[in-house]
Image: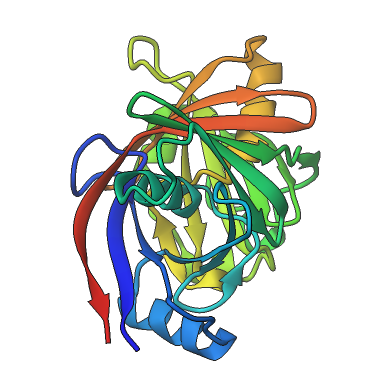
Amino acid sequence: MTIPITWVDAFSERAFGGNPAAVCLPREQLDDERMQSIAFELGISETAFLSPADDPTTFGLRWFSPAVEIDLCGHATLASAHVLRETGMIDGATALTFHTRSGPLRAAFAGDTIELDFPADPVIPGPVPASVEGQWPGAVVASGHTDFFTFVVLHSAEAVRSYEPDLAAIASTGSRALLLTAAGTEGSGADYVLRVFGPNVGIDEDPATGSAQCSAGPYWAAELGRDDLVAHQLSRRGATLYVRPGKERVRIAGRATTVLTGELC
């Protein structure tokens, strides 16, 4: 059985930017081991697997990193919506629903932009974990955690940009990933910046992380007194995300670019 696959760069208006995701449309149900093996073979931060439902605008969606199944992934959800529209599978629909391990997630189309509706995941304040507390001497403004992230706020965007990650120390926090963030620099066009490191899920540095905005968005909305924000992810590939936090949900928008299509054997 061959499996149609599309490689998409999400949260980017150009190829080779943002975060690559593979979107698979199996013709029959795959078992967990097969999906994990495909994700490991592809070796990118997430591979998405779609399955149709009775409603033509509703799909099952699962995400796998090279190492584990992921509970919530923004860029591969954006990529999945992009592929369904680009291939004509949704017949001009303006919105989709995905059933996932994090509940129903929605994607809406506005021109070339796709907006995701995700659950908010506010940061619980707390100390920097012992394994990384010496990583940013004098630079930590605030810290805390969510179920997924260790959350650290630094005093400047440059401190986030220049950080050389100690992956062993990050892994020792016990969190699945480290979210490092700071306010944007005046004139940069960003309200806040971030980087995400996930050695415990097989991703040394994630190029663009939609799910991180479920925590970073509400934090910066409270800090800046605004609910319409622009985030720049300062990975090597770079990414721009448009974030609108609400009380219980966060809207995360961006664009996507198809890089290649084919079939897995």
Left or right: residue 137 compared with residue 234: right
Q: In which quarter of the image is residue 205?
A: bottom left
Residue ID at (56%, 76%): 68
Percent of width and height locating residue 147: 75, 56
Q: In which quarter of the image is residue 225?
A: top right
Percent of width and height locating residue 162: 35, 42
Left or right: residue 225 compared with residue 185: right
Image quarter of the N terminus: bottom left
Left or right: residue 216 compared with residue 83: right
Q: In this view, does 88 lie above or below 201?
A: above
Percent of width and height locating residue 247: 79, 25
Residue ID at (35%, 23%): 111
Residue ID at (33%, 28%): 112
Residue ID at (47%, 36%): 93
Q: In this view, does 141 lie above or below 47?
A: above
Front in this rendered view, residue 204 or 95: 95
